[in-house]
Image: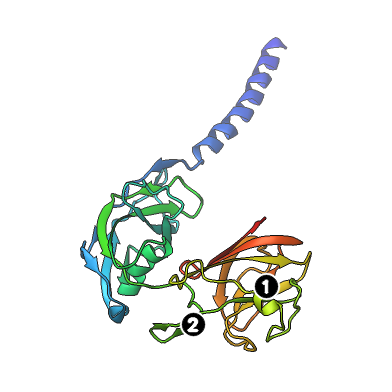
Amino acid sequence: MKHILKLLTGIMIAAIILPACKKDENKVYFEGGTAPFLTASATGPFTLLKDDKDKPAVTFSWTNPNYQFNTGISSQNVTYILQVDSAGKNFSSSKMQEQSIDQALSVALTVRDLNQFPTRMELQFGQFHTLEFRIKSTLKNGTVPLYSNVITIRINNYLDFAVEPPGTVGAQYLDGNLWVVGDAVASGWNNPLPSPYDVTQKIPRKAPTDILHYEGTITFNASGGYKLIQTQGVWSTQYHALDGTAKLSGKFEKKDSDPQFPSPGAGNYKVEVNFQTGEYKLTKL
């Protein structure tokens, strides 16, 4: 009887252990990959000209990282991101730029594409800046990223902007104006603005010759929305938010469209409108 009980116990234990072992054998383990190797068709230095904006500037190419699993090379989609930062910032500055490149192993940039990096980093135009470029690769399941080698390029960028600033006529930049209009402010949606709102709701340039940065103090109501206009009585050249819920900061564009900028809440706020980056920011005073 004891022999039978031992035999039955052994069978039960084997029945528990064997499926578990079989299950472990079917697990897929990530075993790493090879950091992509980045090359550039040209490394400059580049003096970029707006008249050449549509011409080819540089093509970046990189090797496949060949992500490995215990079952073999991954067939999953790989996402690549071109990262750009100022030299010495170790790709960790708040101004670092990224451009997503799904699955391709190269990206061709025009003069304007290349110029957009120092523009969005708010680097002074008309002088050389040393930028560093690298590729970040990841599997779409969130696998730990691999980073390429770094390529350094010196770029002398031209004046450009993410959103066309007020007073722009072709290649000329005239005296631009910017006002807040809407039910988030005292004037309501009256356009043109009646006195005194044509003065109290105006946002001036941060500096007289600075066409890209506007800054001023505006009193807001507790709720409602607003738009930014550059010409009294005209809606067609207005600026609106890209996210109608972003109260204190976000992106905007020049377009006669919704959504509105949302009221940040009752009180006085410093309003900063950055046409170089296409971003706005409100700070409670």
Which mark is first along the chain, 2 or 1?
2
Tag 1 residue:
200
For label 1, the crowd category at 10 Å Cα-Cα, with few meaning under 14, some 14 to 19 and many 20 or more, is: some
Task: Look at label 1 and name its amino acid.
Answer: Thr
Q: Is residue 168 above or below residue 154?
A: below
Pinpoint residue 117: horizontal percent, then vertical percent. 38, 64
Which residue is at the front of the view, 245 or 269? 269
Q: Picture quarter containing residue 121?
A: bottom left
| Residue underneath mark 2 | 167
Q: Which mark is residue 274?
A: none
**Circle 2 — which element?**
loop
Residue at the image position 40 percent from the left and 58 percent from the top:
81
x, y percentage for residue 73? 37, 50
Amino acid type, mark 2: Gly
Q: CA distance from mark 1 to mark 2?
A: 20 Å
State left or right for residue 169 relative to residue 109.
right
Judge depth for marks 1 and 2 and give the one in front: 1
- Does the image show residue 158? yes
Image vertical order of residue 71 relative to residue 78, above or below: above
- Judged from this view, the residue extending furthest toward the top is 2
The residue under the point 74% across, 60% down is 267
For label 1, the SS is helix
Classify residue 1 by image quadrant. top right
Residue 56 x/y as whole percent: 27, 75
The residue drawn where x is 62% and y is 88% is 234
Residues 68 and 5: in front is 68
Where residue 119 sits, quadrant-wise, is: bottom left
Count residues near mark 2 (Cα–Cα under 10 Å), then give few for <14, some for 14-19, many for 20+. Answer: some
Determine whether, in the image, residue 93 is placed left or right of residue 238. left
